[in-house]
Structures are given as structure tokens and as C-alpha cells.
Amino acid sequence: MIPPALGYFLDRTRRLHPAVCAPVSALAYRGLLRSHPIAATRAVTGVPAGLYLHDVVHTDNGTRSDEEVSAVGAIVRHLMDRLIIDGEGSRPLAGADVLVVAPYNRQVRAIERALEAAGLPGVRVGTVDRFQGQEAAVVVTSLTTSSAAEAPRGLDFLLSRNRLNVALSRAQVAAVLVMSPALLDSSPRSVAELHLLAGLARLRAMACTDLFAVPAHRPGEPTAAAAGDGARDGGPGAGVPEPVTEGARVAGGPRTQMHLPFS
């Protein structure tokens, strides 16, 4: 947010589905950013729109996490062959419709190699700096680092609200946050780090349950008639997974604790 004296804040986005816009707005725009109605017309069949959390337990990783590389590959494969709905048209989801963001070049290169080896071409992979101004139906963000102690450039870089905002706000329909839950166990060394951890905890609290709760689409099988916003029978929000709450079990890992002592 910028002071009014320095310019205008455009409070409508035509990119972000309302279910993606809500956590992004809470993270970076004090809840003031809203989706234009046209953004709600986009969907991916069988995947309710929104922010998803995928916890991956790992240790001793700084700028590369093979565990998260594997998780990203599984997520991308899980999404393939679904349909993208944009207004009245639809088409199969392809690699070019998925964007993967990682904070470090080592992780970017590892993910690129893994996707190529898995036969998943066309997926754009890079750091936040590469993707300014770009967009995709689905964005997968790998935070990579196991804990604050392993963060080579500190939490100020890894959990920067500006960088997280840019990463997640590339998504038109769904954003997936892949991370080590131990990042939340950090002891803040300053008020600034406290706010960064609060922002991450808020994102986790607003996220949907793990993406793998959504059945993978098998080629040749019928897909759901409606997708992201649950417009099939129940109106907006129908079929959207329950949010992750305190102590919820995520992605087969240990229980994660949501520490939200501040707003």
C-alpha cells in the first residue's frame, strides 16, 4: 500500500479469482483489493479456486530442497489434463498454464530438470524477479528453506510480503504454497520478522486443505461440470475444501500449529 499523496491505489483486479484474491489482499493490501466479476468466470475443472497449502517436512535445506522439488512435480502432474474454463470457452490445461516460483536459482534449476525428466514440458519456472507482470491459471510456490536457521538471506528475503505477493498474485484460479512447516517455528529477532511470520501464518490459516484432496483427472473420464467457484449446484463456494485450522493435519506431515497472536 502507498500513501494517498503518492498515487492511486487500484482496488480491482481482473486476474485473481475472488478465492485467490482474498488471501493476497489480506497479506499485502490490508484487505482492500477486490476481484472484478470477470475474474470469477475462470476455473479449472475439479479444482476449487483458491490458495492451497502443501506442507513438506524436511531439514537442513537452504537454497535447494529435493523434497519440495518432488512435491512440485507431483502437484504439476496432478493438474495436467484438466480443463481450463474461461467465460464460455474451455481447453485442456497444458504446461504453459502452470507457473512455478522459487526464491533461489538452485531450486529453480532443480525443478526445471525434474519436470523435464518427468515429461512435463512447457511449465515456466523462475524466481519472483522473472515473473513480474506474468500470469498463469495455476501458480505453485516453493519456499524451499527448511527453517529460519537455514535461510541464507534471512527471513526478510524469504518471507518478504512483496515477494510473496508477487508470487501468489500471478495465479488466475489457484495458488499452491509448498513449504516446510518448521519455518513457522522461528523465533523472531525483530518486530519486522514478527510481522513477516504473522503474514505467513495468516496465509496458512486462510489456505484450503491440501490439493491432493481433489481427485486427479484421468484422461477419458468425465470432468466436473463446474470447477473453482463451485457454481455447479451449490452456488459460490460450493465444494470448496475447508480451510486449514489450528492443529490440522496437512499433506501427511505432523500437526502444524497456527500462531496468530497478532492481527
Image: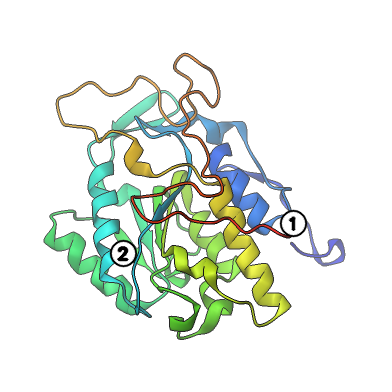
Mark toward the start of the polypeptide (1 vs 2): 2
What is the distance, in whole Å, between disc 1 and disc 2 at their CAs?
29 Å
The residue labelled by disc 2 is: 68
Residue 263 has which mark?
1
Q: Residue at x 41, y 74 (%)?
A: 145
The x, y position of residue 238, in whole percent, is: 50, 23
The x, y position of residue 31, in whole percent, is: 72, 48
**SS of the residue under disc 2:** helix
Q: Nearer the viewer, residue 88 or 107?
A: 107
Question: Compared to 214, does 31 lie above or below?
Answer: below
**SS of the residue under disc 1:** loop
The x, y position of residue 248, in whole percent, is: 48, 46
Quadrant of the frame with the C terminus: bottom right
- Under mark 2, the amino acid is Glu
- On the rendered structure, is 122 left or right of 14? left
Question: Compared to 237, does 97 lie above or below?
Answer: below
- Under mark 1, the amino acid is Ser
Residue 78 has which mark?
none
